[in-house]
Image: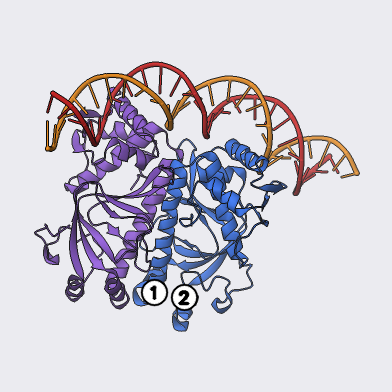
Chain colours: A blue, B purple, C red, D orange
Amino acid sequence: MDVALDTKECWNCPIKHQAVCARCEPDELTRLEEIKYYRNYDAGQPVIWAGDHMEFVASVVTGIASLSQTMEDGRTQMVGLLLPSDFIGRPGRDSAPFDVVAVSDLTICCFRKKPFEELMTTTPHIGQRLLEMTLDELDSAREWMLVLGRKTAREKIASLLAIIARRDATLKKHSPKDGMTFDLPLTREAMADYLGLTLETVSRQISALRKSGIIELDGKRRVVIPSLEKLMNETGDDVDGGLIA
Amino acid sequence: MDVALDTKECWNCPIKHQAVCARCEPDELTRLEEIKYYRNYDAGQPVIWAGDHMEFVASVVTGIASLSQTMEDGRTQMVGLLLPSDFIGRPGRDSAPFDVVAVSDLTICCFRKKPFEELMTTTPHIGQRLLEMTLDELDSAREWMLVLGRKTAREKIASLLAIIARRDATLKKHSPKDGMTFDLPLTREAMADYLGLTLETVSRQISALRKSGIIELDGKRRVVIPSLEKLMNETGDDVDGGLIA
DNA sequence: CGAGTCCTTGAGCTACATCAACGTCCGTGG
DNA sequence: CCACGGACGTTGATGTAGCTCAAGGACTCG
């Protein structure tokens, strides 16, 4: 929970070009710097429970968090995966609508909510950037609705792998290509919660994709994609054009 | 497609307190008024196809539109229901990500995109209001993901009815109460596309809810809710608190 | 009156869930 | 160093919710 990041200053921040502060002028950054602090979480730790009062908003700096909802009887649905530069919280609302949990070890950059809201009304660049990010998130959420509502289990898994592959490639600053390799950041259960499936079905479909030669596995988590085209053919999406964000 | 609305001026607009222009000062409204025009669509007509170049953004003034995605093989998923005051389009993006179709007769208030974007950078109130609306939409989309991913067919139908009941009540400016009545704005097929079901399952579950006394039907479209509490119990949601938006 | 749209209901099938057993890896403590 | 326990993953057997296919009813519009 204490600070462990060596980049405690904005000029040196790994997400400064994508986060909510990306558009800020130096003087705006100075004001932000005054109200910010870092928090760290271990994999598995909760960050916020739905309904909690939130005294901060935040940006993910490193690691991955999940955004999810749970029903009384325990059924849970993940509604978003929060990656570095993604924003947590909602200016203008007091309590959190969803659970936020650290999926991997996680560092977030928190801004005290009250002063952040004030800053938003006085400086245009924060609000502008947040609007852009929120519109992108909304499109992604809507694209995911197609996955949840209409795709088969196999298509769901292929879609998830395609997204992770694409994200992993952009993180490493090269475009996705045949033969690429990455680690699954999620357990089978977390994948199931993201895809609206059971963990057994996830496991079976991953095995099935392996048997079809669409993917290769190295251990439980490491995935090789011999042919991106073959993978994309399994997602059910239009191969050219309309990809999932 | 031509103008048929008698409220062509902003001061007299039925959605002026909720739409993207809700926060505007009189002089900002004047500038908006210069770049706006109305369009009308008949029920069933397309407004925009996914991928189309968009030369305007717009607010729904009266009627209902759907936002949806279709796969190559014809599976379709509705990703949003656009009601009066909801916003269509995305400043800063050129082509539409989803299909927009008029569900009922529809009137929208269009703003030419280029000048609207310019207005957004010069006047703060439009962007602020749009951010608020977009954050609300994002929460709604995420809540709907739980419906699509984890609820049973019966719970899905009950959830949809609960939402429509709530919206209908707020439209008529009273709170939802036992014995309330409303018309379903959607065909069985459109409900199926919204809920990730087939139209047959929708039909069967509506019949089942009727047989259980949760709802009463007057014709195909008119619904009576004898007990809201009973309906809510069928949605699977926490009865107090966390309701679907 | 006929055609089209929307809806309902039945019969059978299948994709995925459920229940259950077991295998692998890894950290902890005897 | 090994034994144990717990987290995570795989696979099999069986059950079932919802899909598919099919027929027919109610209503509307020409």
Describe the element under mark 2 as helix, strand or loop. Answer: helix
* Residue type indicated by callout 1: Leu
Relative placement, left or right, of A16 versus A89 is right
Which residue sits at x=63%, y=39%? A208
Q: Please, which residue is most extreme toward the bottom here?
A: A27
* Residue type indicated by callout 2: Leu
- Of labels 2 and 1, earlier in sequence is 2
The 10 Å Cα crowd at callout 1, few under 14, some 14 to 19, many 20 or more, is: some
Residue denoted by label 2: A32
The 10 Å Cα crowd at callout 2, few under 14, some 14 to 19, many 20 or more, is: many
Percent of width and height locating residue A235: 53, 47
Which residue sits at x=50%, y=66%? A110
Along the viewing direction, whichever of D4 and A84 lies nearer the viewer:
A84
Which chain is mark 1 on?
A
Residue denoted by label 1: A119
Residue B9, located in which quarter of the rendered image?
bottom left
Relative placement, left or right, of B29 versus B77 is left
Describe the element under mark 1 as helix, strand or loop. Answer: helix
Look at the numbered discs 2 and 1 and tell me whether their residues touch, using CB distance below 8 Å: yes
Quarter of the image with the N terminus of chain A is: bottom right
Residue B85, located in which quarter of the rendered image?
bottom left
Relative placement, left or right, of B5 versus B65 is left
| Label total for image | 2
Residue A102 visible in the shown view:
no
